[in-house]
Amino acid sequence: MYSIFLNGIKIGTTELEFCDSSMGVVFGKIISINDNLNYNFIKNYCEENNVEIIHNDFDDKLIGTQNIQELKVYNNSGIEITKNSGCNIEGMDNDGYQITILGIPNSLLEKEFPHHINK
């Protein structure tokens, strides 16, 4: 289980249950620690912090972001796995949200996600 922080505040956890090792990408469902992680929260955060929104459907409460610099993910040992990587959120209120970490170096993928590499 990995902890997700935004601006130093824990917003949830994820198992990072999916991977495209050839692209250096891991992603997984966000398990929110409160009900604040929703369309309005993400949209407002992006607008206030100049984060590009790449998908935005108000009617369906669907949103996708570009890289959010202050979005950090840490393993159980407290090691940041998003360092020098891009990190974004996408999803919708009805189905939940997913975090994607892009550009993870092979050395970190092999160390942190051997179960994905072996697949």
Image (cartoon, rainbow, N blue to C red):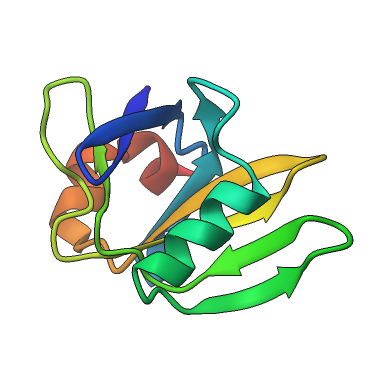
Exactly how many numbered labels are in the figure? 0
Tell me: residue 1, above or below residue 5.
above
Quadrant of residue 70 within the rendered picture: bottom left
Tell me: residue 26, above or below residue 13.
below
Tell me: residue 53, above or below residue 3.
below
Residue 89 visible in the snapshot: no
In the picture, measured across the screen, residue 55 lies left or right of residue 83, that is: right
State the residue at coordinates (19%, 63%).
Answer: 105
Q: Residue furthest right?
A: 59
Residue 104 visible in the snapshot: yes
Tell me: residue 60, above or below residue 33.
below
Q: Position of residue 30 (x, y in %)?
A: 53, 35
State the residue at coordinates (63%, 51%).
Answer: 40
- Quadrant in which the N terminus is drawn: top left
Report the front residue among 70 and 24.
70
Q: Position of residue 119 (x, y in %)?
A: 49, 44
State the residue at coordinates (43%, 28%).
Answer: 12
Q: Position of residue 2 (x, y in %)?
A: 33, 28
Q: Position of residue 100 (x, y in %)?
A: 46, 56
In the picture, measured across the screen, residue 57 lies left or right of residue 29, that is: right
State the residue at coordinates (55%, 75%).
Answer: 53
